[in-house]
Image (cartoon, rainbow, N blue to C red):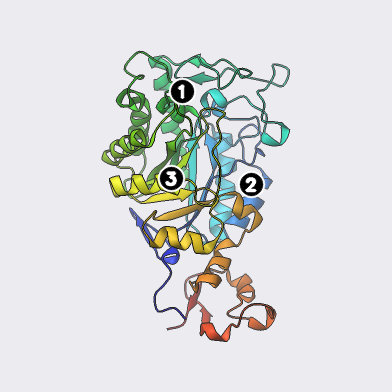
Amino acid sequence: MLDQKPALFEEIQLRNLTLPNRIIIAPMCQYSAIDGQATDWHLIHLGNLAQSGSGMLIIEATAVEARGRITHGCLGLYNDESENALSKVLNTCKKYGNTPIGIQLGHAGRKASANPPHNGGTPLTEKQGSWETIAPSNIPFSNDWHRPKEMDLGLMKKVIKAHVQAVMRCERIGFDAIELHGAHGYLVSSFLSPIANRRTDEYGGKIENRMRFPLELFAAMRDEWPSSKPMGVRFNGTDWDDKGLIIEEAVEFAHSLKKLGCDFFDISGGGNSLSRPEVKPGYQAQFAAAIKEATGIPTMAVGMIRDPQIAERLVSDGTCDMIAIARGFLFEPRWPWKAAYELSGEGNYPEQYARANPLLWPQAFPNTPELNNLNHSWEIGAAPHIMVPKN
């Protein structure tokens, strides 16, 4: 048994919220909502992930207004119907699990009004029910995309108000944390990027101006969210395009967010153009490291982090404070159990699944490495649904 707990399984404090480990389930669009409302699919999908033993589950990108959805099937939180539907899902997940649950709020901007990826991801036609999109400039995402309406100051205020109202709904529902979606070429990301933002007023040009609207938006959201609860931002460390956002600008944005009370950063990249980087495990971790070093704010790395050993190294060597996994959780919904076993960390098992712990029931896992050498002993803890090691 290891003398020291793996870094990946150390707790981390975000305001009054304690995450039991550093493994975050990243937001994943499901394209399964009806009129923005969560369905039984969300209950099954999120209920499953809430039993994974992760440090926090962040619910998919959730639009703050109907035109802010990427597709007709995207989740929303902009009226009583969508609030009630999502509340039922969250209440059930919390009733049967103890995983902290956050939500990603955002607006798709010029990349809205699209088909889901499994239907090509192409712009909707009028026959398919397309709608007007909005952006910092009237520049389409690509040649075959809708030309968005350029936002004036009045429209900016309306979008900020929609985000604030969604924050109020999040508090009523009982979410533990909020993440503002500022990455991947959606509305906030497009303001930050010189590829999408060609404005000549105080909201365009140099990075100080391009980040003005995103900062005004975050400040309004943070003011409405309880001071005891964390709020973070996912944003690009790079646009992966020579004409786009660069890491130095991302660091400047991060410094400004820190001053406004941002509690964590979730660093990704791309989405403002069609350019694609070469992907490999941890390929975007360098940007998380740069932002963490510059600001000291808890930072997540994301991008093909599937190997527990790689995840452990990224956290233990200080590259990042947390790792965010998305599609990897769809393939391995109990990834934290696997990581705990490989790293000799503490697994978080619902009591109903306790016998799935190879350290508790080695006879059920005859083909695993020699378990006796690990010298673990486990018991069901006093806290509901947690497996903890005996002293």
Query: What residue is rendered at 47% in x and 41% in y?
Result: 268
For residue 247, above or below residue 389: above
Q: Earlier in the sequence, mark 1 or mark 3?
A: 1
- The image quarter containing residue 5 is bottom left
Q: CA distance from mark 1 to mark 2?
A: 34 Å
Q: Is residue 52 visible?
A: no
For residue 251, above or below residue 386: above
* Residue under numbered circle 2: 42
- The image quarter containing residue 37 is top right
Looking at the picture, tell me which residue is in the foreground, 316 or 76: 316
The disc placed on residue 266 is: 3
Where residue 224 appears, as percent x and y from the top left, is 35, 37
Three-letter amino acid code at the position of disc 1: Ile
| Residues at discs 1 and 3 in contact (Cβ within 8 Å) | no
Where residue 341 appears, as percent x and y from the top left, is 55, 72
Q: Quadrant location of the C terminus?
A: bottom left
Where residue 181 appears, as percent x and y from the top left, is 47, 37
Three-letter amino acid code at the position of disc 3: Asp
Query: What residue is rendered at 44% in x and 66% in y?
Result: 9
Q: Earlier in the sequence, mark 2 or mark 3?
A: 2
Query: What residue is rendered at 50% in x and 71% in y?
Result: 343
Looking at the picture, tell me which residue is in the foreground, 184 or 289: 289
Q: CA distance from mark 1 to mark 3?
A: 21 Å
- The image quarter containing residue 130 is top right
Where residue 304 appears, as percent x and y from the top left, is 55, 50
Disc 2 packing (10 Å; few <14; some 14–19; many ≥20): many
Disc 3 packing (10 Å; few <14; some 14–19; many ≥20): many
| Residues at discs 1 and 2 in contact (Cβ within 8 Å) | no
* Residue under numbered circle 1: 195
Q: Secondary structure at mark 2?
A: helix
| Residues at discs 2 and 3 in contact (Cβ within 8 Å) | no
